[in-house]
Image (cartoon, helix red, strand yellow):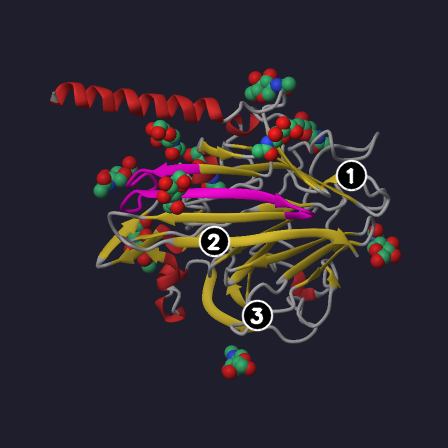
Amino acid sequence: MKLSCATSIVFAAASVAANLARRLPDPGPDGKYTLTAPGIRAKFIPYAATLTNLFVKDKFGIERDVVLGYDNASYYPVDPEHPVYNEVPGRYANRIGNGSFTLDGVTYHLAKNDGPNTLHSGPNNWSTRFWNLTDLTNSSITFSIYDPANSTGMPGHVEANVTYFLEKNKWNIKMEAISPDTRTPIMLTQHTYFNLDAFANPSTNKIWNHTLQLPHSHRNLAIDGNALPTGEIVNISRNSIYDFWSAPRPLGFATARADFANSCGSTCNGYNGQWLLDSDTPKDDVVAKLSSNWNGISAELRTNQAGIILYTCYWMDGLILMKSTQGLVGASKNVTSSSCIAIEAQDWVDGINHPEWGRLNKQIFGPGQKYEWEGSWTFGLV
Ligand SMILES: *[C@@H]1O[C@H](CO)[C@@H](O)[C@H](O)[C@H]1NC(C)=O
Ligand SMILES: *[C@@H]1O[C@H](CO)[C@@H](O)[C@H](O)[C@H]1NC(C)=O
Ligand SMILES: *[C@@H]1O[C@H](CO)[C@@H](O)[C@H](O)[C@H]1NC(C)=O
Ligand SMILES: *[C@@H]1O[C@H](CO)[C@@H](O)[C@H](O)[C@H]1NC(C)=O
Ligand SMILES: *[C@@H]1O[C@H](CO)[C@@H](O)[C@H](O)[C@H]1NC(C)=O
Ligand SMILES: *[C@@H]1O[C@H](CO)[C@@H](O)[C@H](O)[C@H]1NC(C)=O
Ligand SMILES: *[C@@H]1O[C@H](CO)[C@@H](O)[C@H](O)[C@H]1NC(C)=O
Ligand SMILES: *[C@@H]1O[C@H](CO)[C@@H](O)[C@H](O)[C@H]1NC(C)=O
Ligand SMILES: *[C@@H]1O[C@H](CO)[C@@H](O)[C@H](O)[C@H]1NC(C)=O
Ligand SMILES: *[C@@H]1O[C@H](CO)[C@@H](O)[C@H](O)[C@H]1NC(C)=O
């Protein structure tokens, strides 16, 4: 009796798995899953929970692919050193100072993969793993990951789901994660790289003439030469090189200033740091607005996260090619330094090493708790 019961459970489980597998279609001929809603079309792959393409119309009525990535879906895993191209790094995004942290009396040491620090959890990070496709509708897609204990040197296993869903002109993102067994750091982001011109602006392929406004960011985190927060919280004064609160500004408004040099770390010109959201930021307000002065496309970020990272692609080495949906006929297809911007909403970078910031309850999760990230990008014309 016991045996046959167990056997039927196994059969039931197998048939549920088979149904699930049957219910979820294969990707399209390009190896990608395509979702559509009025005014927006997007493509995704399970590898790293990646957004590969995002099409919206510009003021000329032309559809532009406004995010970076590869045409070839199979190429992402072949090139593990690729930028975190619209992927979900984890389980702890961005930098961990000295690759170590102490939790509940135990000091953990991770692999240092970014100078003296750990970036995006180091080797075997979530942005180089094959996630599972676990749900798919015409307008939504869900990817899931089971991250075993110690996979990147952190305690306990973590389970996470990332759901992307489209509405009219809008890309929504929802992430949930749990650590059922033990307390561990969890901090995620959607690491989205934009060039709203899709590299088709004949006057520039750089990002400096995109306009940015961060209306609720009056403070940022000071960084050292390796772009690691020093711990200092800076009030951003009006007209400083970090001031995107007082007015919308071209991203390159300060490029000629002396203090712009090395502003994203040693020998790095541009931005690579975190702007904090004011504590009185109204829920659901736009916290970042990026737009192209050339084709009029605007992108507005809303998020439940407490900060926004900007990285203006200084380290793009010119050896990666843009997609066939991007660029100008006859022009170079190479993605060059300062030709894009990554915008990443997340909690305060390296907060696990700065208890004085009071972020531990937003970055350490254990049994009975749930990590929740929500955000959206709304597209329009300026
Ligand atoms: C896509 O990338 C894979 C892995 O590098 C390669 O085998 C394949 O030939 C590529 N396909 C195309 C069409 O370039
Ligand atoms: C930095 O990490 C190393 C191990 O990688 C450790 O020996 C050292 O104590 C750490 N330093 C600090 C200041 O935490
Ligand atoms: C993520 O892990 C891969 C595979 O171990 C590694 O090659 C890559 O450098 C890591 N990415 C980052 C951003 O550290
Ligand atoms: C999804 O789109 C296909 C093709 O347009 C259609 O046949 C199908 O009914 C749609 N499914 C849902 C759940 O809307
Ligand atoms: C994908 O699902 C399989 C079957 O449930 C599981 O063994 C595997 O660990 C999952 N992979 C990831 C990355 O979560
Ligand atoms: C975690 O993994 C590292 C690297 O594989 C290994 O050196 C270490 O012993 C592991 N720690 C535990 C507690 O399993
Ligand atoms: C992920 O989704 C599955 C299926 O809906 C659900 O059972 C699980 O609880 C979810 N996990 C998290 C961490 O939200
Ligand atoms: C930053 O501004 C706040 C509020 O205006 C003020 O209380 C704080 O002292 C300032 N911090 C620094 C370092 O100037
Ligand atoms: C930047 O945009 C302004 C319009 O806002 C335009 O006048 C100027 O020519 C543009 N510069 C470049 C280099 O495209
Ligand atoms: C452009 O990228 C390709 C592919 O990596 C590379 O072979 C070529 O040398 C690059 N061209 C320039 C001018 O850097």
Amino acid beneath label 2: Trp
Mark 1, secondary structure of its residue? strand
Mark with earlier residue (1, 3): 1
Q: Give the residue number, with chain letter if any, for mark 1.
A: 63
- In the image, what residue occupies the spot 63% across and 76% down? 237
The answer to whether 253 appears left or right of 171 in the picture is right
Labels 1 and 3 touching (C-beta < 8 A): no
| Distance of label 3 from label 2 (alpha carbons) | 17 Å
Q: Residues within 10 Å of mark 3 (few under 14, many from 20)?
A: few
Report the span colored magenta: 144-170
The foreground one among 315 and 161 is 161
Mark with earlier residue (2, 1): 1
Q: Residues within 10 Å of mark 1 (few under 14, many from 20)?
A: some
Mark 3, secondary structure of its residue? loop
Q: Give the residue number, with chain letter if any, for mark 2.
A: 373
Amino acid beneath label 3: Pro
What quarter of the picture does the N terminus occupy?
Answer: top left
Asked whether 156 falls inside the magenta stretch, the response is yes
Q: Quadrant of ligand 1?
A: top right
Q: Give the residue number, with chain letter if any, for mark 3.
A: 282
Q: Horizontal and vertical percent for residue 111?
A: 36, 43
Labels 3 and 2 touching (C-beta < 8 A): no
- In the image, what residue occupies the spot 27% across and 45% down? 156
The quarter of the displayed image where residue 195 is located: top right
| Distance of label 1 from label 3 (alpha carbons) | 32 Å
Q: Residues within 10 Å of mark 2 (few under 14, many from 20)?
A: many
| Distance of label 2 from label 1 (alpha carbons) | 29 Å
Asked whether 82 falls inside the magenta stretch, the response is no
Q: Horizontal and vertical percent for residue 127?
A: 47, 38
The extreme front residue here reads 1
Q: Is residue 111 visible?
A: no
What quarter of the picture does the C terminus occupy?
Answer: bottom right
